[in-house]
Image (cartoon, grey):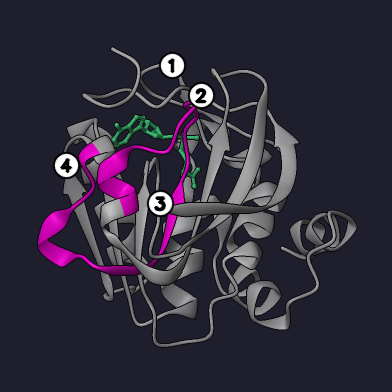
Amino acid sequence: MEKLITAARRAAVDDPRVLDAMRGVPRAAFVPHDQVRLAYDDVPVPIPHNQVTTQPSLSARMVQALRLVRDERVLEVGTGYGYQTALLARMVSFVTSIERWPDLAGRARQNLAAQGIENVHVVEGDGTEGVPAAAPYDAILVSAAFPQVPEALVNQLRVGGRLVQPIGPGGAERVTLFERSFEGLVPLQVVSHARFVRLYGRHGYH
Ligand SMILES: C[S@@+](CC[C@H](N)C(=O)[O-])C[C@H]1O[C@@H](n2cnc3c(N)ncnc32)[C@H](O)[C@@H]1O
């Protein structure tokens, strides 16, 4: 666990709430059984459907950029095995997370439940349409790459809320922090450069 904290600190994560969340989430419980030996290395690990989990220090940077305080309701797009979902759940009041592959969503639900994490709803579906039933959100974290932020996500973010998305074609992204104004999204900062898997869906890649 401390290896991941050290990696996050090296990646400029200094928010004690994010670091505490990392201490509270055993990554080994959020990777496939045959990848457990890599769980405490700061690397992405393969999961089914040619996907990979996000590198933990990068998840920590994206979460930090949202400047979460405690009472927020957050939407995550791209649950994977649920590690980042678990970090968010330790920091805010409720997380809605959407995953397009039903087996991944099911695995994430099991992983989260096994850790006693209950303030999460994992939905199966197309995250490029958001999850309108639980909107508006105080923050949105998109874990897959597309050149634009899907309009539905902009509409489901409250004014003043923050959104992070890897902006790019999949493979070479600017992970960008936005804030929602009355007019739309305002880019605030490039959090990191990174390589992400693609965001698929009606308003993503087909
Ligand atoms: C980088 S991976 C998983 C990241 C995960 N948050 C973690 O902590 O490792 C991105 C995930 O986004 C999912 N995904 C891609 N397009 C999606 C969409 N339109 N809606 C929901 N999930 C999507 C993929 O199936 C994959 O599980």
The quadrant in which the C terminus is found is top left
Q: Residue at x 49, y 78 (%)?
A: 91
Q: Which residues are magenta?
A: 129-154
Q: What's the distance in space between the residues labelled 4 and 2, CA to CA? A: 18 Å
Q: Is residue 144 magenta?
A: yes
Q: What's the distance in space between the residues labelled 1 and 3, CA to CA? A: 16 Å
Which callout, 3 or 4, points at the residue further toward the start of the chain?
Answer: 3
- Look at the numbered disc 4 and give the secondary structure of its residue: strand
Residue bearing mark 3: 82
**144 relative to 92, above or below:** above
Residue bearing mark 4: 124
Of the four image quadrants, the one with ligand 1 is top left
Mark 3 is on which residue type? Gly
Which callout, 2 or 3, points at the residue further toward the start of the chain?
Answer: 3
Q: Do the numbered discs 1 and 2 sit on residues whose CB atoms are within 8 Å?
A: yes
Q: What's the distance in space between the residues labelled 2 and 3, CA to CA? A: 16 Å
Marks 1, 2: nearer the viewer: 2
